[in-house]
Amino acid sequence: MTESAPAERNRRDAALEALRGLASVSVLFWHNILGFFPQRSGIYPGQDLSKAFVSRFWFGLVYGTSAVAFFFVLSGFVLTRRFFLSGDVTSIQRNAIKRWPRLAMPVLVTVLASWACLRFQLYSHQPAAIITQSWWLWYFGNASNTPIVPDFLFALRLGTLLTFFHGDSLYDSSLWTMRFEFVGSFVVMGLALLVRQTPTRALKIYLIFVVMAVCHYTDPQYVAFPVGMSLAAFLPDAKRMTPRWLTAGTVVFAIYCLGYTGLAVGAFRPLAWLVPSAVPSAYVNVLGSVLLIVAAETSQSLHSWLSARWAVFLGRLSFPLYLVHVPVTCSVGSAVLIKVNPRLGAPNAELVAAAAAMVASFAIAYPLTVLNERWLVRLNKIVERVLPRGDALGSASRTASS
């Protein structure tokens, strides 16, 4: 029997989905900082870094770049974890079949919505950028430094093909991650099949090291995927026995690592002294991501907290929220800023605009979430006909691995 969307959610690890949702909120906060409070970001030349958020210990809570690293590590983990626990090859095969249409449908809807906003001139990011002095907002979330001409056929190609195979993100700058997500997913699914069939731990580690080296010299962003897969392969099967004090310490240190940008400023000076300058700062963010996943998977109290209703709901919204928030910030948030700025002035107008952008992002993400879940039901039915669960391939794999 094909599972409904709620049934599929129940099969997922709710705590990990909640962490994905929290990471999406982190990206939402970060882009609102870049758009409405750029002077507090610390990423532009000439800013006083001692007063910027980038120097604060808690910066990892709002640093969207490290949240993306977490997305990549988590994808490597969740796409392969069930396979390593069960040995069922069909779990990898099903993920591979579904991966492109699974990502493409909500991406296409978002791109077409952005095309419509361009077509009917609903974006007001550049007038808003003049008020906030945000280069990020002026360039449409860093999507383009030239005016964007709406083209419906291009939008169709972008939402279905170009963003996954070419890395284009013209209509929504958040889509720059989709090629990494798509390619990295297939890298870890293929690597998982190899690692599972490799007889010794030493050879498994060797294979993983080689793939990580290839990823590093291709683009360091890809390294997060085999790191997540390695965690899926070697983490014990959910023995939740970590004491609370150790879990709390792990989470705090993880957030600290997620806030590292490579700059020796504020709370991150000690870490900058320890980490060689040749090491990409993304690798420290990857370490923080691994620690968060380990904490969630080995602590009963944290896992329970992250499995509460609010967390499950946030996990449902995570991908749609990530997709829609930049267009919403450049339309709703910017329009509100222009409207209220003459009366409120800075920083009150920026606070109101940021709040409006966040509320609107959640409101618009919800119907996309419902649509996405219905699409998953249909997609699962198609895949079920092509590759039923528990077929001979899966049985053969379990026999071979026993």
Image: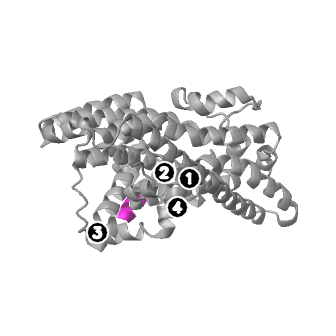
Residue 369, percent from left and from top: 58, 53
- Rate crowding at label 3 as few (under 14), some (14 to 19) or many (20 or more) other CA atoms within 10 Å: few
The local secondary structure at tag 1 comes to helix
Look at 30% across and 67% down and name the residue there.
299
Residue numbers of the magenta segment = 251-255
User: Is residue 253 highlighted in magenta?
Assistant: yes
C-alpha distance separating marks 1 and 2:
6 Å
Magenta span: helix, strand or loop, mainly? helix
Look at 23% across and 56% down and name the residue there.
237
Residue that label 4 marks: 314
Look at 66% across and 30% down and name the residue there.
156
Residue 289, percent from left and from top: 39, 52
Residue 67 disc label: 2
Going by the image, does 35 lie left or right of 264? right
The local secondary structure at tag 2 comes to helix
C-alpha distance separating marks 3 and 2:
23 Å
Look at label 2 and name its amino acid.
Ala
User: Is residue 213 highlighted in magenta?
Assistant: no
